[in-house]
Image (spheres, helix red, strand yellow):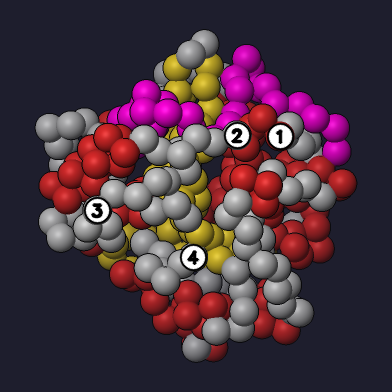
Amino acid sequence: MTALLEDRGVAEPIQSYYEAPVFRRQVDWTPAGRRARIPDCCGPTETRTFGTSFRMARGREELHAAMRLVHDSYVRLGFIRPNRHGLHVIPYHVLPTTDVLVAVRRGEVVATASVVMDSPHGLPLECVYQEEVEAFRSRGFRIAEVSCLADKRDNDSGNAACLFRLMALVAQRSWRAGVNLHMIVVHPRHAKFYEHFLGFIKIGKEKPYEKVAGSPAVLLAGEIDRLPEYNPRAYQRLCGESFPDESYDFEFLAEDVAIELNEICDETYPGGSFLPQPVPMCA
C-alpha cells in the first residue's frame, strides 16, 4: 500500500492520515441529525455569492436541472455519450445516502455536486481505486465521494467563486453527516487546483477511468478534521462562512420521481441500479 501512496513527494502527509486518531461519529440520517450544528469555527452566516444561493436540491425540477447540467458538461468534455433524457443519473443517486447540492441563480441551477456517503454499496470510484478506499475504510474513516461536479459555463466572472462556495457547502454538509474524509477523482491536469485551493492530496496513481470514456484520472483525498493543520487557507475557504439550517432542508423523493430516476439509471447503467423497487431518497 505504501508504494501506491508514495506519489510525487506526498507520502509524508498521506502517512499522517494513518497516524491520526479516528473520529468515530455515528451517522444520523434522521432530519434532526441532518440539521446538526456545524463547527463554531465556520464563522458568520453568509449564503450568497454573486447573487447565487447554495442548498440541497429540492424536488424533481431542481434534481433534473442538476442532472441535466452534469449530462451536458460530460457530453461536452467527451466523458459520456448523450442520452435521450438529457440527464446523467448514476446508481448512487437513488440511494438515501447521496445528497445532490446545487447553486441557484435567478431560479436557474448553475452548478451542482453530489455527495455520495459510504454505505454497504461502496463508492463509485471503487471501480478504479478499491484498494485505496479500503485502506482508509479499514482504519475507521467515514468517507464520502464528491461526484457529478459541473457548472454552467457562461463566462461569468462569478464562476470560480461559485465553485468555491459550492465546495464549502459540500464540506460543511459532510461534516454534519459525520464524514471525516472526502475523496474525488479528477483529470490529472486539474489535480493541482484541488490540492492548492481545496486542500486535497493526491493518493492514487493515474489510471484510465472507464466510466468517463477511459479518460485519465487520479484519486485525491482531503481529511476534513485536519484541514486547518495542513492547509489553513483551504480550511478558511471552505469553513470561513457557514450556511443556515435552511440550506440543508430536504424533501423525501416522491415515489414517481424515484421510479423515473431508477428507469433512467437502468438505461445508462444496465443492471446497475441498486434498487429493484424505488425507496424514498433525500433530494
Q: Earlier in the sequence, mark 4 or mark 2?
A: 4
Look at mark 1 in the image and give the residue it sits on: 245
**Between marks 4 and 3 in the image, the one whose residue lies nearer the viewer:** 3
Q: Which residue is denoted by mark 4 in the rendering?
A: 118
Q: Which mark is residue 249?
A: 2
For the residues carrying marks 4 and 2, which lies nearer the camera in this image?
Answer: 2
- Name the image quarter holding residue 269: bottom left
Pointers 1 and 4 in contact (C-beta within 8 Å) = no
Three-letter amino acid code of the residue under disc 2: Asp
Crowding near pointer 3: few (<14 within 10 Å), some, many (20+)?
A: few
**Residue 225 x/y as whole percent:** 75, 63
Which residue matches tag 3?
277
Tell me which numbered mark, 3 or 2, is placed earlier along the sequence: 2
Q: Give the mark nearer the N terminus: 3 vs 1.
A: 1
Mark 4 is surrounded, within 10 Å at the Cα level, by few (under 14), some (14 to 19) or many (20 or more) other residues, namely: some
Give the side of residue 278 with respect to residue 100, left or right.
left
CA separation, marks 1 and 4? 23 Å
Per the rendered image, the range of residues in magenta is 43-70
Taking 59 as reference, is 54 left or right? right
Q: Nearer the viewer, residue 20 or 6?
A: 20
Instruction: Give the residue type that dot 1 points to.
Output: Asp
Residue 206 at x, y = what percent? 38, 68
